[in-house]
Image (cartoon, helix red, strand yellow):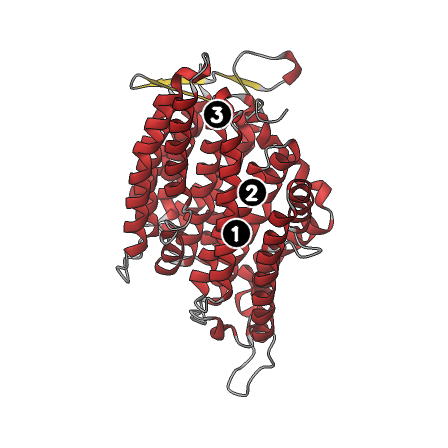
Amino acid sequence: MMSAPFIWIILPFLVSIALVFARKNYQMAALIQTVFCLLLVFLLLVVHFGEFDSAQGLSINLESTFNFLGRSFEFNNSDKFIIGIFYTVLAAWSGTLLINNKQSKIIPLGLTLTSLLLAANAVEPFLYSALLIEVAVIIGSMIAVDLNTGKSKGIIRALIFFTLGVPFILLAGWYLAGGETSPVNDTQLIQATVLLGFGFVFWLGIFPFHSWIPLIAEESEIPDGLYILAILPFAIFIILLKYLNGFVWLRDYDLVYQALLLFGLVMTFTGAIWATFQTQVKKLIGYLTITYSGLLLIALGLNSNQGFQNFAELLLPRFVSLFLLMAAFLVIEKKNEIENTSDLESLFYRFPIASLAILIALFSITGMPLTVGFLPVQSLYQETAKNSTVITGLIIGSNALLSISFLRIFMVIMQPLADEFDSVSILDDIKENKFLAAVLVVTVLAGLIPNMIFPSFNQILKSFEFLVR
């Protein structure tokens, strides 16, 4: 019988290899990858992992385990939504590249990266996830590197930091391995927590190991860099949750959640300060991803059902904002090179739809009213206020700094058109603008009617039943 890990890990890897040879016809390869990802997402709706359940009706039954090289990969029904996120994000990026006819190594290496990240989350024993993440980062660096400029400082730093994090994660897992079924003593628990903390400090880019994030955003082409910054931290967060969910003595240790809160505050506040004074557009986006990762860590550090729900809901505006920025800049860069915020001057009169996409993406990050980020950010304010008004104040202060910075960008974008500029009709790139307009409509509706979309993201928590009490 066919197994779920084979279909969503091994098969995409094989398709990726096949697309390497078909890449001479880039449009065809991009179309195949987009359709393949959408088929994998659709298939999740009609299959059942594990033993047959009559309640599933006519769903297709798949084995939940696949053995490979002496290791097993396992997917449960509760993992479907997470798998769907990985392939939906890749389908969105691939489809946008196809529509804009933009050459990118995401075609076909995105499938390889996604299969490796899913393998890292599915492998048993779970200790081997660190090694698979290391391989995934190597593939990610191949996607991120810009062969035209040859700049690689950010990629090298990312490889160094992730490699430094691997032994810490492995040692922590070895310490905790006995703690799944039998108690570990306080000394072991403290040592394991410190080791695990160091590992994730390197992996998530927590100060002072954050420099690879803005550098990758700066040195890579827009779709490549933003895809790596969108999907890689998400995979790391899922692995962090698996550690907390899998080891009872770890998830009941208050110091772990205090550390998550501290690291989250550091990322949120420092990222906001750096973003506020940043004039290079790409690096600005890199610092925004640091800020948002901090909000996700704060949500986890609250160690409450509402906190974990906030984490799940914050993921949607994160993906949507990065996707909107990527799609908007792809449309703009066909006629204009955008490097500094000053290059955005009068952009609305030249690229109205792309300008709206940029502004909506930026203000969604700070949770402005009527944006897709409003509900989760406001919920985070309310939940943190129950624990500490200081934490809430720091988050609000960080978002206030970003809002002021975004208002300056708004004023630059909406500045009246100078005489030397000519307005550009949206009919010039009607296909790209239609696509971007459709995405904007969906994004605005998600902000206006949040109850239609956000509850579905709570399905992520089904994979971590011991965390949500």
Distance Cα–Cα, label 3 vs label 2: 17 Å
| Picture quadrant of residue 196 | top left
> How many C-alpha atoms fall within 10 Å of the one at disc 1: few (<14), some, or many (≥20)?
many
Q: Amino acid at mark 2?
A: Ile
> Compared with residue 269, is residue 39 higher up or lower down, i.e. above or below?
above
The mark that comes first in sequence, 3 or 2, is 3
Q: Position of residue 52 (x, y in %)?
A: 57, 12
Residue bearing mark 2: 298
Q: Position of residue 118 (x, y in %)?
A: 43, 31
Can residue 252 be seen here?
A: yes
Q: Residue at x 47, y 16 (%)?
A: 63
> Compared with residue 87, is residue 422 higher up or lower down, i.e. above or below?
below
Residue 268 numbered mark, or none: 1
Q: Amino acid at mark 1?
A: Thr
Q: Position of residue 409 (x, y in %)?
A: 56, 70
Left or right, residue 101 beside residue 460: left
Residue bearing mark 3: 250
> How many C-alpha atoms fall within 10 Å of the one at disc 2: few (<14), some, or many (≥20)?
many
Q: Position of residue 68 (x, y in %)?
A: 33, 19
Q: Residue at x 34, y 59 (%)?
A: 219
